Image (tube, rainbow, N blue to C red):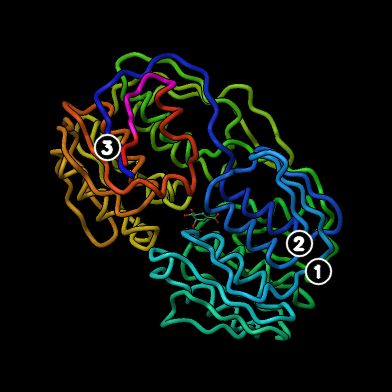
Amino acid sequence: MHFQVKPSAVHDATVTVPGDKSISHRALMLGSIAEGRTEISGFLNGEDCLATLAAMAAMHVSIEQPTPTDVVIHGGGLEDLHDPGMPLDLGNSGTAMRLMSGLLCGQAFDVALTGDESLSGRPMNRVIVPLSQMGAVIESDDGCPPLRIRGQCELEPIHYDMPVASAQVKSAILLAGLYADGETSVTEPAITRDHTERMLVAMGAAVSSENGRITIQGRPELKGRRIQVPGDLSSAAFVMLAVLLSESADVVIENVGINPTRTGVIDILLSMGADLSLENERKLGEEPVADIRVRSSALKGCAVDPALVSLAIDEFPVLFVAAAAAEGSTTFSGIGELRVKESDRIAAMAAGLRELGIRVDESEDGAVVQGGRFKGGTVQSFGDHRIAMSLAIAGTVADSTVTVLDTDAVATSFPGFTGLFRSMGATIEEAG
Ligand code: S3P
């Protein structure tokens, strides 16, 4: 599948985006090891989360999905996962693979975790090292999936100083900590998304956070609950950018998660001159949400504050497009982690934007993007959902048609992407 994007104007609208991917994964995993009924609404019915759902069901958890966005789990507690009798295929999802490593390394059964070509090249030593210190036994292919996790390992609580800022690593350790007697803690070098901690507390675990150190008490009794998943700010970012770049539009994106560990993209766009505001701020369970109002704006280049990197980690592809459409140059630094995401996102965006006539100077952990005009052309997504969607947004304001190749992966995080943009006036067609 590929996208054909024609220059087209986005008009005024009120829209919603699919549920948050990070929260949907966590709701499935924690609901599966909590006692009793967990009812998830606003679930992201995308391929990544469906891989996690299938994995939990394969471990004999009773899960129903009465509608695409509603999931009901009948959990049996920490000890009620069972041998799936087959490898668990986690598709494209780094979150599923890393969190599941933590969840499964203290179980009574052996289990293998596999993934697609992209996931099979992603670094897993960042979870294998701390989990091994806890007593887990995990074999890998030179630090990459597939992972073979040995059962019947007694886990010991540890303190771990994380060398990389990663919510996935932090969460893996906290999930393993559920199965260790005593206090497990991690220190993070920069603040990362805290959805795991919030959900664990809401389900009854003792988790505290002080000065970058997060501590969990092992073997809690988790209680099933209702989890309302907010719209995914990472998906809303594509809508925000399409509106900002359009001639004259005023759009409200309703019910989007604005957890402060995720809002770096809003701060960066504001510093580029975006007309963005939060309306109707409220809480949805343990997560803050708002309606985001965005209006067309003339963006200016800036030096992106490296302190915001971990708070905007998934939004850099679309921020590269913002930079390319801004007046002047934008400097990104401290973004080396982008090189080990679903693709090497610095290289992928540099290649795509250059193809569209934009100057990008890359370094190992950064890039300088010169603002300009997009010309038409054919660009690669490298099978990465966020690269595909970012380049499609560039196409809406290009001089002529932009074809984005290999866009199937968009279904991992943003089902209905093209339909939503068409409803806002953009001309994005899917072709076989
Ligand atoms: C995620 C954490 C981030 C992010 C990923 C989702 C999560 O990864 O890039 O898309 O749900 O915990 P890292 O924490 O490894 O940076």
Calculate the distance from the C-alpha at mark 1 to the C-alpha at mark 2: 8 Å
The mark found on residue 323 in the picture is 3
Region rendered in magenta: 423-429
Per the image, the residue denoted by label 1 is 80
**Quadrant position of residue 226:** top right
Which of disc 1 and disc 3 is earlier in sequence?
Answer: 1
SS at circle 3:
helix
Q: Alpha-carbon distance for marks 3 and 1? A: 49 Å
Under circle 2, the secondary element is loop
Give the residue type that dot 1 points to: Asp
430 above or below 73?
above
Q: Quadrant of the C terminus?
A: top left
Give how far across and how far down residue 73 sits, in percent.
Answer: 77, 52
Amino acid under disc 2: Val
> Do callouts 2 and 3 mark residues in contact (Cβ within 8 Å)?
no
- Which residue appears at 28% of the width and 21% of the height? 8
Q: Residues within 10 Å of mark 3 (few under 14, many from 20)?
A: many
At 53% across and 63% down in the image, what residue appears?
90
The mark found on residue 61 in the picture is 2
Residue 219 position within the rendered picture, expressed as x and y whole percent measured from the top left: 81, 70
Please rate how many residues cluster around mark 2, counting C-alpha atoms within 10 Å: few if below 14, some from 14 to 19, many from 20. many
